[in-house]
Amino acid sequence: MQAWCEDLSQELVLEAMKIAVESGNKNWSYVEGILRRWIDKGYQTINEVRAAQKEYRERLNKKSAKQKPRMERDIPRNFILDMDAGEDE
């Protein structure tokens, strides 16, 4: 943990730990995965991380808004399903 604080910052390590806990993951390897991803993306400040998270959430919201709504139909109250319809007796 100390090495990560020296390489990045204590603030970023704490933020990664918060994210891990919020997602239900309390193990250090998950936190390290977050930190590695941030290094790969070039994030160096907490503001960069938070801006990227905000952008990601906005993209998800746009994507879900674009999805077509499911077609649903009401079944008439007097509808009776005849499982034998069309069968020869």
Image (tube, grey):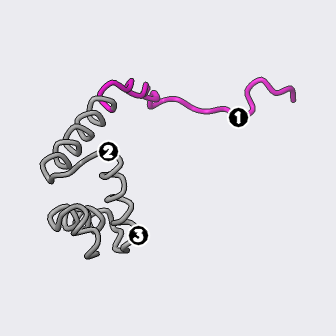
Q: CA distance from mark 3 to mark 2?
A: 18 Å
Amino acid type, label 2: Lys
Q: Position of residue 67 (x, y in %)?
A: 37, 26
Q: Main secondary structure of the magenta part?
A: loop
- Mark-to-mark CA distance, 2 and 1: 59 Å
Element on which disc 1 rests: loop
Residue marked by disc 1: 83
- Left-right relation of 36 to 9: right
Relative to 62, is 21 above or below? below
Badge 1 amino acid? Met
Write the residue at 29% across / 72% down.
3
* Nearer-the-camera pick, 44 or 66: 44
Instruction: Tell me the residue at 43%/25% (across/down).
Output: 71
Q: Are marks 3 and 2 in contact (CB under 8 Å)?
A: no
Residue 2: give x, y in percent of width and height: 25, 76
Q: Residue at x 87, y 29 (%)?
A: 89
| Residue at the spot of label 2 | 41
The vertical placement of 83 against 43, above or below, is: above
Query: What type is the residue that disc 3 sits on?
Result: Ser
As rendered, which of 26 and 67 lies closer to the eye?
26
Q: CA distance from mark 1 to mark 3?
A: 55 Å
State the image coordinates of residue 23 (x, y, percent, origin top left): 31, 62
Range shown magenta:
64-89
How many other residues sit within 10 Å of disc 2, few (<14), some (14-19) or many (≥20)?
Answer: few
83 shown above or below 26 = above
Residue 11, image x and y in percent? 14, 64
Residue receiving disc 3: 29
